[in-house]
Amino acid sequence: MTFCTAQNANPSAMLYDRSQSDFRVFCNVYLENSNQKNHLFNTSFFDFMAGISNDVNIGVRLRYRMVEKADSLSLKDAFGFRNYALDNMGNYARHGLTGAELLIRHRMSKSGKWTAQHALGIPLGNQLEQHFDRGFLDWNGLGWYTQIFHNRTMKRFNFFYDIGIRIENISRSSFSNTKTHYTTYGIPVSFLPGIFLGKQNYLYLLTQINPVLAHSVFETVSGNESDIIQSIHFQLGMGYKLFCFRSWELELISSLYRIDDKKAITANLGLRRYFNRILY
């Protein structure tokens, strides 16, 4: 067993030794109110990350998603897991296993305070995007996400920074101005300052801004046309981590989310089990 304090147990930044690993289940619920419609997403992630050396970790992540769009929805509807066809008012519900990600995390500095992570997203399932009477569930294309993490602890205070490049719905047509596609490019930047309330409790502020550019080519009666859409995603919230039973971590996050003039709320719950790593 390797001992570490909770201050060094930020799994997004740290690297595991060869014998160390973790398993995490994380549930993200997102509820958006736009144009008198509620759009509800419940996305569950199942992660496994392991050290293959002291400098490189590899992992895999599965994604299961539920989406529902209706006139009146609340957070409690996120666990209904209903299925009904897309109607002429734009209402629908759908859920299923939608994707997997292959992860690699590596050291960028000798101290380990700078690390990088790369993720290749692979779609699973059939016709994940809107198709006839089946509403949108996820992207049909590949995804790529590169992040650079920096973590610094000063006594009871911790400062976590994250900047990345995220490309979603990559296909053979993504870089074409004539073939139909819809591909998004984002640069998410996060800052999470926090305070340790003893060895087992950690409270933090979550802030993130993500400028997103979407490139689409769509069919019209006069032929295919190209368009570029710009938007700003902003998120502000609070998070709490409880380190318990020496090698378990419980995490709760709540946040306000805004995309231009669209407003949403999120609620998140995560549970992580560390192997061969003692937290306190």
Image: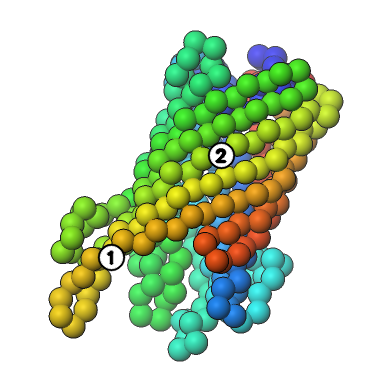
Q: Helix, strand or loop at disc 1? A: strand
In the rendered image, is residue 269 in sight? no
Q: Is residue 64 above or below residue 263?
A: above
In the rendered image, is residue 157 in sight? yes
Dot 2 or dot 1, earlier in sequence: 2
Q: Is residue 272 above or below residue 213?
A: above
Instruction: Say which residue label 1 marks.
Output: 227
The residue located at (42%, 76%) in the rendering is 134
Q: Is residue 50 above or below residue 3?
A: below
The residue located at (71%, 18%) in the rendering is 154
Instruction: Say which residue label 2 marks.
Output: 190
Question: How much space separates mark 2 and mark 1, taking CA atoms?
Answer: 28 Å
Disc 2: CA contacts within 10 A as few (<14), some (14-19) or many (>=20): some
Nearer the observer, 223 or 3: 223
Question: For residue 125, which quarter of the picture?
Answer: bottom left
Q: Helix, strand or loop at disc 2? A: strand
| Residues marked 2 and 1 touching at CB (< 8 Å) | no
134 relative position to 236: left or right: left
Residue type, mark 2 in image: Ser
Quadrant of image for the N terminus? top right
The residue located at (51%, 71%) in the rendering is 94
Relative image position of residue 29 (x, y in whole percent): 63, 58
Residue at the far right in the pictured view: 198
Relative image position of residue 195 (x, y in whole percent): 76, 30
Relative image position of residue 211 (x, y in whole percent): 45, 50
Quadrant of image for the C terminus? top right
